Amino acid sequence: MLCERPAVKYAFIKKNKQDWPVAFQCWVFSVSRSGYYRWCQLGETQRNKSNQQLDSDIIELFEHHKGRYGSPRITKALKDNNQCVNHKRVAKRMVALGLRAKQAKKFKATTDSKHDLPIADNLLQQDFHANKPNEKWVGDITYIWTTQGWLYLAIFIDVFSRQVIGWSMARRINKGLVYDALLMAP
């Protein structure tokens, strides 16, 4: 009780003012009598109304910016709309609402084109015409988002029928990924 915020202490004092004097309770809880009486005059309702309005403004701004704004940016946006708010109060209200800004993810390079490894010759020379099945195959590797996270997909297609003849998925891109896709092909 001694570590609670003043509004909790004031509510306790108000509830128990028949049993103990207000001045004594204020001294015990280390709060000022004038603060208690002001709290009684204004009541908790005015602060609640103010918080409800602030909460709706915060939620609106948070959703408008797709969850990317944290308390400093929302405070600035509220001040730009001529609302006098403190960044600490906005942060406190966001915690109470369970709002947390999304962190921007760092760019991660997935390919390294500056390497000294051998590069295979382009045997097709952009000629994607085949006269019979299994005459020409083409393949590619890409990455896709799944419920398990990012996965790499290696795929081979028959140029004649444009059917997938082999594919493989893995968490890491390596020669085993391509090898497994080739093993699936007829």
Image: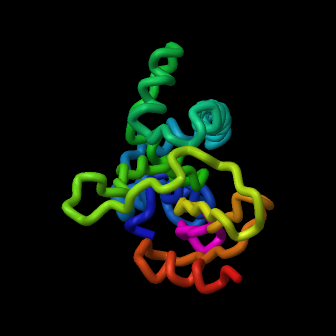
Tell me: residue 182, above or below residue 57: below
In depth, the one of 85 and 77 nearer the eye is 77
Tell me: residue 174, above or below residue 137: below
The percent position of residue 176, horizontal first and vertical second, equals 46, 83
The percent position of residue 54, horizontal first and vertical second, equals 60, 33
Quarter of the figure with the C terminus? bottom right
Tell me: residue 79, above or below residue 128: above
Q: Is residue 79 visible?
A: yes
In depth, the one of 87 and 167 nearer the eye is 167
The percent position of residue 119, horizontal first and vertical second, equals 32, 60
For the point 53% across and 47% down, which residue is it? Answer: 94
Confirm whether the magenta stretch covers residue 48. Answer: no
For the point 27% across and 64% down, which residue is it? Answer: 118
The answer to which image quadrant residue 109 occupies is bottom left
Magenta span of residues = 145-155
The answer to which image quadrant residue 88 occupies is top left
For the point 57% across and 33% down, which residue is it? Answer: 65
- Name the dominant secondary structure of the magenta segment: strand
Tell me: residue 5, above or below residue 35: below
Q: Residue furthest left?
A: 116
For the point 51% across and 47% down, which residue is it? Answer: 125
In depth, the one of 113 and 91 nearer the eye is 113
Confirm whether the magenta stretch covers residue 146. Answer: yes
Drawn side of residue 48 relative to residue 21, left or right: right
Q: Is residue 27 visible?
A: no
In depth, the one of 133 and 104 nearer the eye is 133
The percent position of residue 60, horizontal first and vertical second, equals 65, 32
Quarter of the figure with the N terminus? bottom left
